[in-house]
Amino acid sequence: MSAEDTPERTAGGLAGKVAGKAKEALGSLTDNDALAREGRLQQSQVDAELQAVQEAARARQQEAQAENEAARNETERERKELRTELAAKEREEAIERDRRQSEAQARAHEREAESTAEADRRRNEAAAAQAEKQAETQRMSAAQEAVRLEQEARRAEERANQLDPKESK
């Protein structure tokens, strides 16, 4: 087998690049075109490997950036969702507070109306009792006046009988 038939494993990285340059220079000095060509190929392979590594690193970086962006987007979406839920909860709590307040006001108005009605009832009862008392007092006064007038009429009749006894019969 010749050197061209056996696949030679070439070193990569900086050592491969240096080895390739050395082979190219040695081949040029010795007029060994195959060796010079092998050196150039080795350098090209190292350059290609380096470029592949750099592209893979860029791809990983872009992938990481894409993942970070996706994570930021997801976080922002979740944040918006939470804000929406919180706003909805606050609206529900405000509605509940307003409902309780309205009910409390309604109960207060109802108690006030009941209290006013009760006070009106008591005033009306007191006024009725006062009117009844005044009416009773007026009846008593009228009865007393009637008794007094009757007595006065009897006395006047007795005096009239004493003055003219003939007319009494």
Image (cartoon, helix red, strand yellow):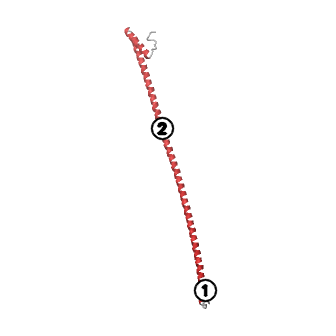
Task: Write the residue at 37% across / 9% down.
Answer: 29
* Element at label 1: helix
Relative to 162, say whether 22 is above or below. above
Is 21 in front, or is 72? Answer: 72
The residue to which callout 1 is attached is 158
How far apart marks 2 and 1 lie (CA) works out to 116 Å
Report x, y in % for residue 88: 49, 44
Report the quarter where the C terminus lies.
Answer: bottom right
Left or right: where 43 falls relative to 108: left
- Where is residue 103 shown, x and y percent of the image? 53, 53
- Provide residue 111's location: percent of width, then percent of height: 55, 57
Q: Residues within 10 Å of mark 1 (few under 14, many from 20)?
A: some
Q: Amino acid under label 1?
A: Glu
- Quadrant of the image occupied by residue 43: top left
Q: Which mark is residue 150?
A: none
Q: Residue furthest top?
A: 30
Disc 2 on helix, strand or loop? helix
Instruction: Please identify the quarter of the rendering in which residue 17 is found.
Output: top left
Where does label 2 land, which residue?
A: 79
